[in-house]
Structure formats: C-alpha cells, structure tokens
Amino acid sequence: MKLCVALDLPDEKDNISLAKSLKECDVWLKVGLRSFIRDGKNIISELKSINNNFKIFLDLKLYDIPNTMADAAESIAGLNVEMFNVHASSGKEAMKMVKDRLKGMKNPPIVLSVTALTSFDDENFKSIYNESIEKKALQFAKDSFESGLGGVVCSVYESLMIKSCTNESFLTLTPGIRPFKNAQKDDQKRVADIETAFKNRCDFIVVGRPIYQAKNPLDAVKKILEILPEK
Ligand code: C5P
C-alpha cells in the first residue's frame, strides 16, 4: 500500500515546501485541480526537480465527450506524470478512447476512474445517480476494467468488492483516509483509517488535510509510513 500526499495547499510555494520536506520519503504526490489551475503544468517539473523519484498522480477527474477526453489524455501523457484520472460516469466509449489514445506510447500513465466521490453519502449519491453507492461503484468499476483502465478511485469500503469482481491487480486508490485518532472528517463522508484500508486491500491511500494541516507535516507522514503495511 502506497501513500499519496495531496498537495492542496493555498499557495504554490506552500506545496513546494511541503514536497521539499518530503524529499526523502517514499510517497506519491497528488496534484489536484487547485494547484494545476493556479500553478500550471510547470508544477510537475518543479516537483520532479525536488526528487526525480517522486511519482505524480494528476487528479483532474476528466469528464467530457470521448474525443475531448482522449485529446486531454494525450496532453496529460506529455506531462511526465505517472497516473491521472477520469470520471467513470463519462462512459465506456470515452474511457476506451482515452486508453486507445495512449496505446503505443512509451510508459503511458496509469489511468484510473472515479467511481463515487468519498464526499458522498448514500442519500446525496442516490439523488444524482438513482442507485446505492455500492451498486453503482461496482458497475463503474466493471465498466472501467472492461475499458482497459488500471484501476479506480473509490472509498475503502468498496475496495474489496471491486477487486473480487474485477481482478486483484486492478488498482484501488482510496481518499477519505483519516490516519490519526479523533481526526476531523471535514467534507468527507466515507472515511477510514489505515488499518481498515489495508484490510480492504487498497493499493493507494490519499491523505491531504491530516498531513498538510498537521503542526509538523513531515512527522505526520513519517507516522503514517511507520504504520503503513508493506504489500
Ligand atoms: O484532505 P483530504 O485527505 O480529505 O483530501 C482528499 C483528497 O483526495 C482531495 O485532494 C480530494 O480532491 C481528493 N479526492 C477525494 N475523493 C475522490 C477523489 C479525490 O477526496 N473520490
């Protein structure tokens, strides 16, 4: 199980100093909408220049018509990131077109799809998708698997079920992780601790606020890495 640290800080320099403080740590870095829109694509090369071994997950959650998504995927593949994501609700045609566009490239990034955001509870999810999270997340995961994607973004609570209905090597990346006792949930609804993530065979855990809002983010990361079981 790998730790992916969300660089969601209010300023580019804050994200950069957080990344610098984690220079020696075996972590993935997640560049999300806030940073990418504000800082642009140069943020990727800046992070790589801190430590070229940092692996980067570009969390832009693409959602558009198939051709536009494939065009965007092709541009992302030129950015030197190891992983990015799309929304599974964009449909199989779009996901297949994204994968097709990356075919033949040298070391293309892993493509994940978002099933159900961890900020949804069953009630507000149902009001949009007219299904329970469990049922729909599973269908989205199967669609993504059949479209050739590498895995999904889901909550810890869907990870095991998704693996058993697709393939053990189909990746699950799970946000909504609250590693420390008595932590705030913030806007996340389906949260879990590291132990639960491990039991549910999650491949990646994403942690943002519990790290960057900690008094000492490096200490927080070290504590997480200490309890992170090797897989
Ligand atoms: O601060 P926190 O640990 O809640 O951050 C979670 C991160 O994961 C945020 O950057 C959020 O955008 C992202 N994310 C999520 N749920 C998803 C996909 C991504 O929380 N389904």
Image (cartoon, rainbow, N blue to C red):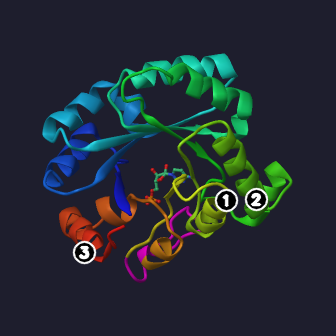
Q: Label 2 belongs to which residue? A: 124
The amino acid type of the residue labelled 1 equals: Phe
Q: Quick check: is the Cβ at mark 1 less than 8 Å away from ligand 1?
A: no
Which mark, residue 226? 3
Q: Which residue is mark 1?
A: 120
Q: Residue at x 72, y 34 (%)?
A: 92
Secondary structure beneath label 3: helix
In three-dimensional space, the C-alpha distance between marks 1 and 2, rounded to whole angstroms, equals 6 Å
Instruction: Tell me the mark number nearer the camera, choosing from 3 and 1.
Output: 3
Above or below 90: residue 41 = above
Residue type at mark 2? Asn
Residue 152, how many percent across, how many down?
A: 57, 49
Chain part drawn in magenta: 180-194
Mark 2: secondary structure: helix
Question: Measuring 43% from the left and 25% from the top, which residue is drawn there?
Answer: 76
> Which of the marked residues, 2 or 3, is nearer the chain's N terminus?
2
User: How many residues crowd around disc 1 within 10 Å: few (fewer than 14), some, or many (20 or more)?
Assistant: some
With respect to residue 136, does 181 lie above or below?
A: below
Q: Is residue 174 left or right of residue 93?
A: left
155 above or below 33? Answer: below
**How many marks do you count on the picture?**
3
Residue 60 appears left or right of 13: right
What main secondary structure does the magenta stretch of the protein show?
A: loop
